[in-house]
Image (tube, grey):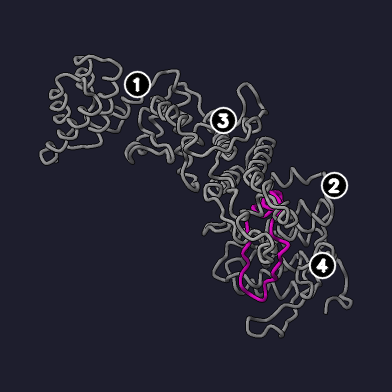
Amino acid sequence: MHEHTAESIAHYCDDRLIDEAPGLIHRSDFVSSITGKAHGVFLWVRIVVDMLVNGNADGNSKDELLKTLDKLPPRLGGKDGLYMRMMQNIKREYLPESKRLFQLVMRWGEADMVGFLDIITLFLAEPGHLEADSEQELRARNDRVLLKSWDEWRPRLTDLEHRLQSRCCGLLEGTENVQFMHQTAKEFMSRNYLWDKIFPNTAGFVGKSGLDLAMLSGLVRRLKCCGEAAFKPDGLHNQREQDPEVLSDPFKNLEIPSRGFDLLYSALHCAHLLESCDRVDQYVALLDELDSAGDQLTRDWKDGLAESFRRSPVANASWVEFFIMLDFPDSPEWPKLADLEPKSFLELANLENFFPYVEAKIRGKDFPRPQLQSLLLQATRRIHIMWKEQSRGTIAWANPQISEMLLQEGADPNCRDADWTADMALEEGLTAWTGLLQYGLVVDKFDDSWVEPWILTVKVFLKYGADPTVRWYSPRGMEDREAVEINTPDTVIKEVSARQPQYQKGLADLMELLSEAKANVGPIRGKGP
């Protein structure tokens, strides 16, 4: 390999040193030395030339540079390799920041975050989510909104690039997409036993919660200064103001900014990572800041709307309504519950199963019963949460934990009050309870990820007074919409048991609980149709 690549390596070294270190004397000595030690590894050559260029820029003499070159190890990885030598050259006072930067980039990759980690987000996350010398004050809360484009940030990017280089010695690079310079560098930093050698007695983020809170904070702070994430002032303004179609559906022709999608989606993904976080107050406060930052993306755009649009739903819509839509299975058995569409961040958090956040907002707050009922409907469905104009989304499952909290706060599992079930297919007689049972009949039998949370949620409903003797109508199939059949909790559980035999024990326990509940309510007296 060395014999075949030596000439190419020599040309590469010569060209770069001519361009980037024109004052370097006896250039051929450096080219010869590098080519001889490279063993055909171009990555090693690239790193070494970078070091020579930087050393020359720092004013090092030829002898000093050759001495440095002579001491460089010929291999890249390992405890005695070139990567270790590079990391050991980081100034001691930079090590804490270096450790946190590496932790964030590695966590971004392992958590399968959406989109790229840009250099601004990275350095906004690096200090952590709390202000220095504070145990509660959020950095994100103290940031003012300043929506600037990437080009407007460019002068600042040069400083951040230099900072990244000095803290991470070139192993991390990039601006719009910060990542490891090479897979071998990532593998080197993935070896846990090397971290004590690289960062001896150096404080970084403590635990995954501290790291994930910092990442969430960085994303929220980035939203507050990302011009590409905001809605553009044109779009709706260029449409005919009196167009009935536009006025009836003002969201129809809006272009959703993809960068806003990336940041918001990644922030929600971080929130999922933090569901078991022990710093609940800080978690809730950060999600409140996320909500505020999301609304800011549409605020300036809405402020410039023509008068005719100010009377349309778009004028008072939250960012959730701009970005989020629900997708229901195409089946007549599945009611088109339009009122389940989230209109606030609380409702989205409910669908996303962010229990700590939802509980903090509702528990002991004397929430109005109609709102509790609406949230209960959302918490008992399997729904596709889609991002408009995007192919990505998540699935909301029945959530026993949120359901139990809502029932404890006063929601009624059997309620059919018209004030909260308007436009919710009342002709099918659905309540939160019967709707929960109903979707056990229509979910794909080849998908069993819904079964366990469904069983647990049904148990919760029976615990809090769901009617075990209820009956309701549902259509039989796609072709015969007029034909109906009567369903009961028993028939639903038996059908689910037949379709999901691997859950026989849990479903048998459910039938036993149902029988006990029936015994407690006495004989059936004209219930249902």
Q: How crowded is mark 2: few (under 14 residues within 10 Å), some or many (20 or more)?
A: few
Can residue 209 be seen at all in this image of the molecule?
no
Which-is-in-front pick, marks 1 and 4?
1
Asked where in the image residue 213 lies, by quadrant, the reply is top right
SS type, badge 1: loop
Pick whichever of labels 3 and 1 is earlier in the sequence: 1
The x, y position of residue 25, in whole percent, is 17, 18
Count all numbered tags in the image, as a single digit: 4
Q: Which of 256 and 78 is in front in this view?
A: 256
Identify residue for label 1. 89
Residue lying at 13% horizontally and 30% vertically, measured from the top left: 36
| 3D distance between C-alphas at marks 1 and 4 | 70 Å
Question: Which mark is drawn over residue 366?
Answer: 2
As shown in the figure, which amino acid type bears the numbered disc 4? Asp
Identify residue for label 4. 467
Pick whichever of labels 3 and 2 is earlier in the sequence: 3
As shown in the figure, which amino acid type bears the numbered disc 1? Asn
Highlighted magenta segment, given as a residue range: 324-352
| 3D distance between C-alphas at marks 3 and 4 | 49 Å
Q: Which of 65 and 241 is in front in this view?
A: 241
